[in-house]
Image (tube, rainbow, N blue to C red):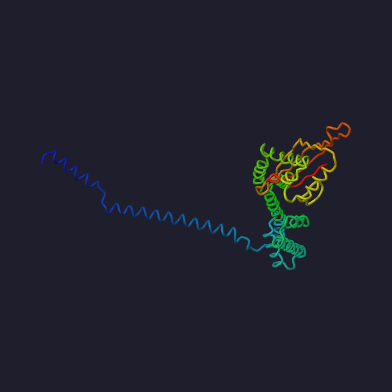
């Protein structure tokens, strides 16, 4: 065998020895797996230890025995930091452990007052939870154990009432009472939406002004049909008469046109605002009314000026009218 053939044989031997055996590879993989499982086991064990400590801290730490002074001190702490549940537990703990304690009388008085205030508030919440009743409760217990809870309930009721009315004034009133209330951001957003909804368009202004103008034009023309067309079937008030009807409007029309006097009505200076409730707009109108009597008769000519207010519904019908 020459030297070249010898070198080739040596190279094959070296390469063969460098190839790891299948058994060795499987052994290494098993070793890695067992090491990973052991690592996971220790992590899980550590997690259970931490969780156990947390459970002890939150659920079992208060089962320790307190001295009388410690219990009394905690009563004051829970009272001053507004923790009624913890306060109630500590009041009962003190009376159970120190029935002849130095502070027995004070603790008994606190517990009695606590239960009275709690039962009173619960009665309101379960039977007649209104703004008035909760507000009365807060006023009656200015330093009460449940003052914070009652104020939060009142906050919720006031905001719900503002949502019920759904007007800029209602939201403004809520924000005035609760500038830092729990629903402050929502109330501000609702206020912006309500103000946008209550903007009166030019088209609405023209339609509302037109019904007022048409109403007095019908009175001037002694037009029964047209005057009835401009009013709702039932009015809340009309020229000083409450709960008026179309018949009351017709009577006013006839009374105005009695005699030989000629009357001309001119309306102007419209100030129109809108309130939207449950999606239905109502228009409040202020306007000027000039009544000219016998304008072409220099001897009997008279002029009277009135300030008028009216309410016009979504159908552009007058539901209330007052002249001053």
Image quadrant occupied by the C terminus: top right
Residue 25 image point, x, y percent: 29, 52
Residue 77 image point, x, y percent: 70, 56
Determine the residue located farthest toward the left in the rendered image.
Answer: 1
26 left or right of 13 in image: right
Judge by depth and name the residue closer to the eye, 43 or 132.
Answer: 132
Determine the residue located farthest toward the top in the rendered image.
Answer: 298
Image quadrant occupied by the N terminus: top left
Q: How many badges with numbers are in the image?
A: 0
Residue 321 image point, x, y percent: 78, 45
Determine the residue located farthest toward the right in the rendered image.
Answer: 299
* Residue 222 in view of the camera: yes
Residue 287 image point, x, y percent: 77, 38
Q: Residue at x 50, y 58 (%)?
A: 48
131 left or right of 41 in image: right
296 left or right of 16 in image: right
303 left or right of 163 in image: right
Judge by depth and name the residue closer to the eye, 51 or 315.
Answer: 315
* Residue 179 in view of the camera: no
Q: Residue at x 80, y 48 (%)?
A: 251
Judge by depth and name the residue closer to the eye, 19 or 192.
Answer: 192
Judge by depth and name the residue closer to the eye, 203 or 183.
Answer: 203
Vertical arrangement, residue 119 with respect to residue 280, above or below: below
* Quadrant in which residue 15 is drawn: top left
């Amino acid at each position: 065998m020459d030297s070249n053939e010898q070198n080739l044989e040596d190279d094959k031997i070296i390469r063969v020895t460098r190839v790891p055996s299948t058994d060795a590879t499987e052994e290494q993989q098993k070793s890695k797996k067992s090491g990973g499982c052991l690592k996971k086991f220790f992590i899980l064990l550590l997690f259970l230890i931490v969780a156990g400590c947390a459970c002890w801290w939150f659920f079992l730490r208060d089962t320790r025995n307190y001295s009388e002074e410690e219990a009394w001190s905690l009563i004051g702490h829970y009272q001053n930091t507004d923790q009624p549940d913890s306060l109630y537990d500590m009041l009962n703990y003190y009376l159970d452990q120190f029935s002849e304690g130095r502070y027995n009388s004070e603790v008994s008085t606190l517990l009695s007052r606590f239960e009275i205030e709690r039962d009173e508030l619960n009665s309101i919440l379960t039977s007649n939870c209104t703004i008035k009743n909760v507000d009365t409760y807060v006023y009656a217990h200015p330093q009460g154990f449940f003052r914070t809870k009652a104020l939060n309930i009142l906050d919720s009721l006031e905001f719900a009432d503002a949502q019920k009315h759904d007007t800029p004034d209602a939201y403004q009133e809520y924000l005035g009472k609760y500038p830092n209330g729990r629903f402050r951001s929502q109330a501000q957003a609702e206020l912006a939406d309500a103000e946008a909804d209550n903007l009166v368009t030019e088209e609405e202004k023209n339609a509302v002004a037109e019904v007022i103008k048409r109403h007095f034009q019908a009175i001037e023309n002694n037009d029964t049909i047209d005057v009835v067309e401009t009013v709702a079937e039932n009015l809340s008030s009309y020229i000083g008469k409450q709960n008026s009807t179309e018949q009351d409007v017709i009577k006013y029309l006839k009374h105005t046109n009695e005699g030989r006097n000629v009357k001309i009505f001119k309306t102007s200076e419209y100030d129109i605002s809108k309130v939207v409730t449950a999606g239905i707009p109502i228009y409040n109108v202020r306007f000027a009314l000039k009544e000219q009597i016998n304008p072409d008769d220099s001897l009997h000519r008279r002029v009277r000026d009135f300030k008028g207010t009216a309410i016009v519904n979504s159908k552009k019908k007058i539901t209330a009218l007052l002249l001053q």
